[in-house]
Image: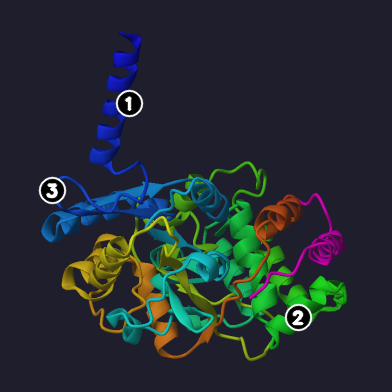
Amino acid sequence: MKKLVTIFLALVSLLSLAACGGSGSGNAGSSDGAVSITIFNSKNEIQPDLEEAAAAYGAANNVNIEVYYSQDTVAAHLATRYAAKDPYTINMVDAKDVYSLGAEYGYDMSGQEWVADTDYAITVDGKVVGFPVCVEARGILYNADAIQATLGEEFDPDSIRTLDDFQAFLDRMVAGGMEAPVGILKPDWSLAAHYLQHVYEEHADVEGFVQDLYAGNVDLMQDEKFNALMDTFDVLKQYNMFKDGPIAVEDDQVHQALSEGEDAFQFGGCWEWNDIIDYDYTGNIGLMPIPQNVEDEFTGKMVVFGSKYFYVDNSENTTQEQRDAACDFLNWFALSEEGKTLVSDTCAMISPFKSNDVPCANDIGVSVKKYADAGLTIVSYDYDPDDHYSKLGAEMQRYLADQCTREELADAIEAYWASSTPVEH
């Protein structure tokens, strides 16, 4: 009897595996003949929309699609999946992850139709492996309605080029009745991965500057760009409405203040849109370059970059049928009217594809398009070490809270880079 029970349980197990095809993305088919693929999404704000779109696409194209999200660090999360031999079919990652993970696991999409429609694809070793999900930009967010309500005049962001211009304007806002016209987000990713990042990106030879940081050959206190950007940061601190508790404030408080016009300026980018509209949004929030008292080739420009990329898994745990289905989905995402509407209207992202003429539902995107169309853009640097924003973000938080001097911050940044291993690219 025991032997019969054992045999019976083994048969049940085998039948179950045959029906399910395994638990991971290696499931190439199902009982209805549909191919099954998985998508890893690392943009939390679009998860419901992406799930709904994947379900509709799957039903129309006989594909079973599951969309997953994780708050874990992208590289660490995907490394765990690869270690378990259970990778996702399509992976949404940051640009730097395309160069590390995509080099080993990325499927060559060079021949896909979408490639000719964008300037933001990532090529590794001669192969197109990075599919751009959207375009984003960083700079100073402004609430034009709040400014007009305070000063009684329309706001022209082009009137502010220098830090002196900006400070004089902030003084006018204070005199007009807005006691603290700035809000500052505290997260390490905002302070280090975004604001501090400009120190590297606004050097004529970015790669050379970063390599000098690795080699310990940079004295930031003597660096014009570092000091110009930190001068601007000091002014943001001076007018920060949350300066009594700058690292205790929650992100939603900062977003709400800008959204509802309680303040008028905040360093940030396009990704803030879905947070801003959660409140009693006044309308007319835009993005302008970071004003600095340095006149150089970066003046009046903002960093515009492909933000988030898909790559298709090319490991032995994904079948060619699944890869083909994944590529079909990405072509739909980029080129179909439904896909264009999903990106620009439903998800309110700025499309990186030239043929997408669906108006962006993101007010901030209008500002970005203006600078992008005029060529007033700065190239992003995508090769920081993985712990850059967490370690230097903590140092920036100390500076935000007046717990260290600028010289101490500079020393910490220099020490970090000198102790880090250069990122291969």
Q: Position of residue 268 (x, y in %)?
A: 52, 63
Toward which corner of the image does residue 117 lie, by quadrant? bottom left
Toward which corner of the image does residue 183 lie, by quadrant? bottom right
Mark 3 Cα shell of 10 Å, populated few (<14), some (14-19), many (≥20): few
Q: Position of residue 225 (x, y in %)?
A: 74, 79
Q: Position of residue 131 (x, y in %)?
A: 40, 72
Mark 2 Cα shell of 10 Å, populated few (<14), some (14-19), many (≥20): some
**Residue 279 appearing in the image:** no
Q: Report the mark closest to the observer, 3 or 1.
A: 1
Side (left or right) of 425 relative to 401: left
| Residue at mark 2 | 209
**Residue 90 appearing in the image:** yes
User: The residue under label 1 is which amino acid type?
Assistant: Ala
| Residue at mark 1 | 10
**Are the residues flagged by discs 3 and 1 in contact, CB closer than 8 Å?**
no
Residue beneath the point at 82% across and 65% down: 410
Magenta stretch in the rendered image: 402-425
Q: CA distance from mark 2 to mark 1?
A: 62 Å
Q: Quadrant of the C terminus?
A: bottom right
- First reached walking from the N terminus: tag 2 or tag 1: 1
| Residue at mark 3 | 32
Q: CA distance from mark 3 to mark 1?
A: 25 Å
**Quick one: SS at disc 1?**
helix
